[in-house]
Each structure stands twice: as C-alpha cells, then as structure tokens.
Image (spheres, rainbow, N blue to C red):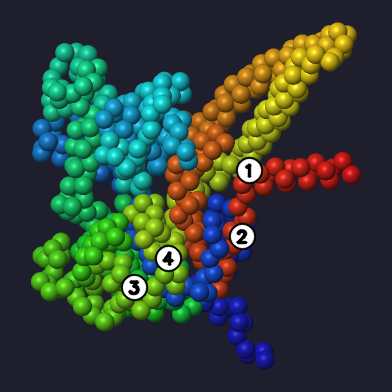
Amino acid sequence: MLGMPNIFQQLDLRLKKLLQSTKTAIFDPSSAVYTNRDLNLNQILLVGFDMDYTLANYYHQPMEQLQYQLTVEYLIRSKGYPDDIRELPYDPNLIIRGLVVDKKNGYLLKLDTHDRIWRAMYGRRQLSLEEAADLYANQKIRLGSSQYSSLDSLFTMSEACLYCNLIDYFEERHSQGMSLNPVEPLLDQTDHNRIINTAKLFDDVRQSIDAIHSDGSLKSIITQDMPTYINADPDIALTLHKFRKAGKKLFLLTNSYWSYTNCVMSYILGGKLPEYATWQSYFDIIIVGASKPSFFVDKKPFFEVDTKNPAQMIDQVGSIAVNDAEFSRHKVYMGGNLVDFERMAKCKGEQILYVGDHIYGDIVLSKKESLWRTCLVVEELQHEINFSIKYAKDLDRASTSDAKRLSLDDEIRQRRSLLFHIEVAAKNNDLEPKQIEHLLKISNKLRRELEDSQNMLHKLDKKSYLFQDKLEREFHSVWGRLFREQNQLSRFGAQVTYYACIYTSNLINLLQYSSKHIFRASGDFMSHDMALINTAQLAKKKR
C-alpha cells in the first residue's frame, strides 16, 4: 500500500481543469447557460457548431479594425469614394448588436419587442426620444422591406461605424459646398430635404465588406497572423471532447469555405488533445460553404470538396452533386440543405442541437424551418450580467419605481370609476337637494385628488424615465443595454427569448454541465398571472 501512487497525482490534468472550472463557474452567473425552453441533453444525438465567433473567438478590436480599414480601401478603389475617408477613425464603442438601419433615411434605430423606437442615431449624432418619435409618428416599421437592414452579427459592428462616419463626412462636405459623389441624391426623389443618398451609401458599404470577405483579402491577412485575430482557447477542444465522450456525434456547419476553415480550425484544435490526430477527427460531419441562412430553406445539393486542390476551394468542387445515403467521416462537404442533411445524417428534429452566434443566420431560420434545438452564443451577455450585478441596487430602485407607477395607475382608475358612478347618482331626480349637494362635494374632492394623482404620475413617469435612461447609459453611453430598453425587451432580447432554446456568453460554458443535464426554463407569466401572484402575496402579508 505504501508503494501505491497517489491517485490525485495521476489525475488527468484535463479532468483537474474541468473539475476546477465546474467548481468555480457555478458561482459565476456570467458563465452560466440560460434557458428559454426545456432542453434535455441526454436526448440530443447530434451536436453542430458554427465556426466564426462560435468555435473561433475573434479578438474584437483588431478584427473589426482590419475589416474597417479594408472596407475603406475597397470603397476608394472600387466605388469611387474620396481618398480622405481613410482619415475617418474606427470607434469600437459606437455600435451594439441588434440595431436596425433605416437605409432610406440614414438612421440607426434601437427597437423594443413591439418594434417601438427608443433610440436613434443619424451619423454620430444621437436623437432625443422625442425626435425619434416624431420621425416615425404613426408609421409602421416594416422590417421585412428593403428599406431596413438588421445588424445581427458581430461582423456588422465595423460596417455600421463606417456608415455613421460616412454620413457625417458627406454632411460636412455638403455644408462646405463640396461634391457628394458618389452618393448624390437621386434627381427624382420625393424627399427634397435629403442631401445624401443614404440607401446607396449603406449598400456600397455592405457590398464592400461582403467583397473583402469573399475575395480572400481579409482572410489572407488573418491566416498569416492568427494569434493577433483569434483566441485559440484550449477549452474549445475540451468541450468538443466531452460531447464525444458522452456518445454524441458532432458536425461543423459553416459558411466559410474549405481553405479558410482548414486554417482556422487547425489553429484552434490542431494538436490540442492527443486523442485527435487532426482537427477533422473531432467531427463526424464537416460542411463548409453552407450559405446559411439559405441552407435552411433552399434545396441546394451537397458537393464533395477536393481538399487536395486548394485552387478550387471557393468553387463548387465537382460537377456532380453528392447523393450519398449518409455522410462519410472521411469527406468534406459543401453547400447542401436542411432536408438532405437530416436524411444523410440519419438524425432529425429535436435530436439535433445547433450552436451558433448569428441570431438570424444560425438560430432564427433553423428554429423556424426545423425542430432543431438551438444554443445561441452571445459574447455581450457576460458584460450585461456583470453590469446587472454591479448596479443591482439601482435596477431594484427602477423596478420599485415601476411598481409605484402601476399602483398609482390603479388608484387613478378606481377614482375615475367612483367619480363616474357618483356623477350618475347625482343626476337622480329622486334624490333630495342635500343628498345631491353632498354627492357633488364628494365629486369635487375626487376631481382634485384625481388631478393631484395625475400630476404625481406625470412627474413620476418623467423621473423614472430619466433615471432608467441614465442607468441604461452606464451599460452603453449611446444605446443602453443589449437585451432590454427601459422595462421592455429590446428587439434583440425578444429574438433571443423566442428563438434560442438556451443561450450563453461562450461555448466553453457548456463544460460545466453533464451530457445528461436537463435545462429547465422558468415559467412563462402573462400580465394577469403576475397580478394574481401579487394579489396572493398581499393577502399573505395581511394574514
């Protein structure tokens, strides 16, 4: 027995790390996984992953700066923009995810779950709530129209910043009587107050940033200097390994093509764990060039990628579509569609969990078009949770203020109802004059009380709005919180709630949970449910 080695000395270092992360993360809400709908991991047979910002975590500042600079150069070289736009600086703190661009009028908008506008910006100038409300008074915001574009992914941060900078740039040129080429307003436009063709400006920026992604200029710089742009967290390999050890099959589903995917995944997973000879060994199915979100709605065939012929990686390799009965672990596929995927994977619907970062491309359409379970990675969640912890007392104060406003609203409702019945009674011809006089005195008193309550509510509304606005700006000086706006969910927050079964700030947070874990959602409450709960609580206090 004395010669028996200490079992703890032999403990796998990876297991030690996993145990330590599990022990500490339980107490860290910013690294937890949150649940919108019950999800039993034991029932999941196939787990899929997006690559960019899911498996591959980019460092934001250098990545966005690079995209910004390359887009500027493309605008100058290919779109005829003035050379001095190179002097416009990138501001990493100007934009948050989940905004909507009104291309026609040039505004960036933050909407709530009911598509009400709360915050707006033109160029780098923030509009007041009153200005924003006046601009869109009695107008239906039709987000499906070509007038609007959503900033859904982290890739759009640099794009939106450049758009704002260029609006200010051309506004300044106009004030100096200089040319607005190439964004001169159309001659037949109906809005004669518009001095910049903001729709063309946005489309030019969007086309340019798409071009630097597709022509290889951006990716060639990244692949030449991976440590500057990508965080190769070793826990990514551990997370995939844990799923595989639990008997899950894994697949990669990315829009990136083979050449770039191979470079990035080799950097992230290559040589990380001895059980896996190459990064491909982690996955049972590898699909590149998936063209999400159309992957979930179109009927494009799968093609097999010739991984030994890099010159053809961007094209659909092979002239004959793949009609395999099932996927092969030794092949890499491109394109494809949801229906053929489920057929060839021998797995479908709620047996599949897909993890991605793009609310629309990865989550919304996969949820709308299939029964796949979804996990959304939202990096900003960590910041938002830490903010909520830091300002917990202020948030509680805001909640208390909301409760006071609701209580005051109810008092006003009751007084109005009582006043109505008294005034009706006072008109009764069967009453004696003294009775009528008494009712009128009560009526006048109620009117004064009602006026005082309404004034009090007006002041409380204004005070509450200013306090909550100040609190929101502690999170982001322009746009406030990502998931909320005042006491409403933001449009982005509503999308996360509705479409993501579970969500978290980082893929590696899944390490904390057993492969048999059941994520249980808290109950959904409607307004009348909360009223009944509050009534029950008040009754309990009185007893």
Give the amino acid type for the residue marked by disc 3 in the picture.
Answer: Glu
The reply to whether the C-beta atoms of the residues labelled 2 and 3 are less than 8 Å apart is no
Mark 3, secondary structure of its residue: helix
Asked if one can make out residue 323 in the rendered structure from this viewpoint, the answer is yes
Residue at screen point 27% across, 58% down? 294
Of tags 2 and 3, the one toward the viewer is 3
Asked if one can make out residue 438 in the rendered structure from this viewpoint, the answer is no
Q: CA distance from mark 1 to mark 4?
A: 29 Å
Mark 4, secondary structure of its residue: loop
Residue, disc 1? 527
Precedes in sequence: disc 3 or disc 1: 3
Q: Residue 87, image x and y in percent?
A: 22, 29
Q: CA distance from mark 1 to mark 2?
A: 32 Å
Of tags 4 and 2, the one toward the viewer is 4
Residue 67, relative to residue 16: is it above or below?
above
Residue at screen point 65% across, 35% down? 399
Give the amino acid type for the residue marked by disc 1 in the picture.
Answer: Ser
Q: Residue 193, image x and y in percent?
A: 25, 17
Quarter location, residue 452: top right
Residue, disc 3? 342
